[in-house]
Amino acid sequence: MTEQRRALATLSRQLYKKGWMEGTGGNLSLRVEGRILITPSGAHKGRIRPDDILELTEEGLPTGDDRRKPSAETSIHRAIYRLFPHAGAVIHVHTPDAILASLQGNEEIRLPPLEVIKGLGFSLPEEAPPIPLFENNPSVDKIAETIENRLKNSPAPLPVLLIRNHGTTVWGDTLDEALRHIELAEFCFRVMGSLSRTDRHRS
Ligand SMILES: [Zn+2]
């Protein structure tokens, strides 16, 4: 899995440079052959090397005798993989745009009907599809449980969810697809922030 470790480490450093994984925040994972490769807990995401990537079973247990701690948000990644059998990659980032967007709804937020939503797999954005929104909680396991329980019965229309005052999580069949999803989701949140500033200015 050398190639996959390298891909995760490279993307981690790239997303850090974009300002999306500040202060050790954010995490990335890949599901490969029944294993989860994931970024470590508490590590600076701008300095991740392929050897820093941890390998877990789908139950979240370390393979071999690796005693390093995986991402504190591993339970959210595992919930996504259980919910979406096709998902092969999960990306979670902390951005100011996502946090501002997360303040614009209760259990969901509505995206503006932007052309780029097509890139998230939604064909005609005449009506903005909702993004499920979850409350933050000091217990990540609790957030993961809430996500799994709600999305099991009411699947997300786009491969994106938000946690209030926290950040964005996306998934995709591949790491490249998940990267496209996070870029487009963050683009939409950025536009939402600009639109609400314009509205405030007008009123
Ligand atoms: Zn987070």
Image: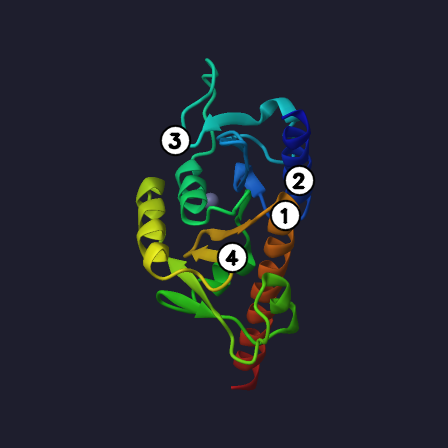
- Against 148, is 29 above or below? above
Q: In this view, does 171 lie to the left or right of 6?
A: left
Vertical arrangement, residue 62 with respect to residue 163, above or below: above
CB of mark 3 within 8 Å of CB of mark 2? no
Mark closest to the chain's N terminus, 3 or 2: 2
- Which quadrant would residue 50 be assigned to in this image? top right
Q: In this view, does 178 lie to the left or right of 150?
A: right
Observer-nearest residue: 68 or 82?
A: 82
Identify the disc placed on residue 159. Answer: 4
Q: Is disc 1 placed on a helix, strand or loop? A: loop
Q: Residue under circle 3?
A: 59
* Callouts 3 and 1 close, C-beta under 8 Å: no
Front residue (pair 53, 1): 1
- SS assignment at label 3: loop
Disc with the residue nearer the chain's start (2 vs 4): 2
Q: How is the image coloured?
A: rainbow
Q: Label 1: which residue?
A: 19
**Pointer 4 or 1: first along the chain:** 1
Mark found first going from the N terminus, 3 or 4: 3
Within 10 angstroms of label 2, few (less than 14), some, or many (20 or more) residues?
A: some
Q: Mark 2 sits on what residue?
A: 11
Q: Nearer the viewer, mark 3 or mark 1?
A: 3
Dot 1 amino acid type: Gly
Looking at the image, tell me whether mark 1 or mark 2 is earlier in sequence order: 2
Q: How far apart are marks 3 and 4 (CA)?
A: 22 Å
